[in-house]
Amino acid sequence: MRILITGATGFVGGYLAAELAAHYPLAKLFGTTYGHTSGAMLPGSMPLLEADLRDPAKIREALAQSTPDVIFHLAGFASGAGTDVAVIRAANVDATRMLVEAVAQSEKPCRLHLASTGYVYGTTPPNVPATETDTLRPEGPYAQSKAEMETAVQPLASEKLSITVTRAFNHTGPRQTPVFVAPGFARQLARIERGLDAPVMRVGNLEARRDFLDVRDVVRAYRLLLCELEPAPWRVVNVGSGEAVTIQSILDTLLTLTQTCVTVEVDPARLRPSDMPECVGSSVLLSHLTGWRKTHSLTDTLLETLAWWRSTGVEIW
């Protein structure tokens, strides 16, 4: 089996590569990379192909070099905090469409995974996790780009080109960029503990409720869906915990893990214009199809994330 991971040097890409290498030691793994990396720890034998996926020629070159049976498409703009509509759309819609078109034009059958987001559902009602049949109501440029991406590529799905779309909700863990909330808090706390910053935690909206998973549970879901199921032309599956967690509780948990006294201040720069009050997803379909269950508690994930920032993280960012 030949596997290509786009965006392999990103946060999720490193964990996915490790998951695939552990379960398919005879598979040939390839990855694409472009620009800044997260310090992902990739298998040593994994070739990396420099490729800007907004360039059709680079896409064709990467496909020719890897000739994949399976593609995990992770490359793209990944933050809900982004506001540049043109940049986000180019990365998430245009680049994805060009990749899928290039794969569709190949004679080789392929299984293709597209990483969408649970944010395409918009605000979910309290205590009612979103399911795959719910109407999409994306809020903000990032979520809108992912919903548009799904619509743009669905007509290209076929028996030869099997497309699986995952709508993963918030996932976190060690090595994630501090643009995201849990590593952002952990980084601040680690710097305060080292005396690098004043003992003030700067926060955004702490009342928002989100669905958090460990990144390792998420990449396991990706592997099971794409590599262990019979292919279908088009499949959409949520990856979430089904549980709402306030951002306040993320902060509170991290603060219990330090002996340092800190104060908490709201930073207006961290408040997002399209900050949904709640966004939670059901993984009933995922569990039914694959037997998947989450295996990491959020507390343990936060503890590992803080430990990583304490040991190495502040030296990288």
Image: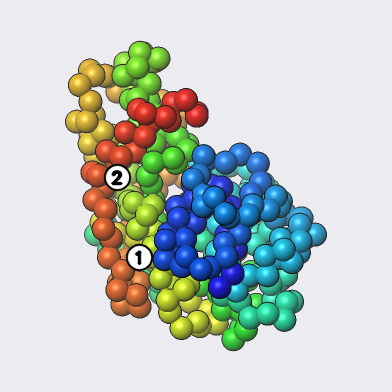
Taking 294 as reference, is 255 above or below it? above
Question: SS at mark 2?
Answer: helix
The quadrant of the picture occupied by the N terminus is bottom right
Taking 90 as reference, is 100 above or below it? below
Q: Nearer the viewer, residue 238 or 35?
A: 35
Point 39% across, 63% down: residue: 220
Residue 317: horizontal and vertical position, in percent? 50, 28
Residue 131: horizontal and vertical position, in percent? 36, 70
Query: Position of 246 compared to 73: left or right?
Result: left
Residue 137: horizontal and vertical position, in percent? 47, 61
Q: Amino acid at mark 1?
A: Ala
Residue indicated by mark 2: 301
Q: Amino acid at mark 2?
A: Thr
Query: Position of 45 compared to 117: left or right?
Result: right
Q: Residues within 10 Å of mark 1 (few under 14, many from 20)?
A: many
Let me know if residue 117 appears in the view.
no
Point 40% across, 14% down: residue: 196
Residue 184: horizontal and vertical position, in percent? 40, 33
Residue indicated by mark 1: 130
Point 54% across, 47% down: residue: 10
In three-dimensional space, the C-alpha distance between marks 2 and 1, rounded to whole angstroms, equals: 24 Å
Taking 156 as reference, is 301 above or below it? above
Give the number of marks: 2
Taking 158 as reference, is 137 above or below it? above
Q: Which mark is residue 280?
A: none
Q: Residues within 10 Å of mark 2 (few under 14, many from 20)?
A: many
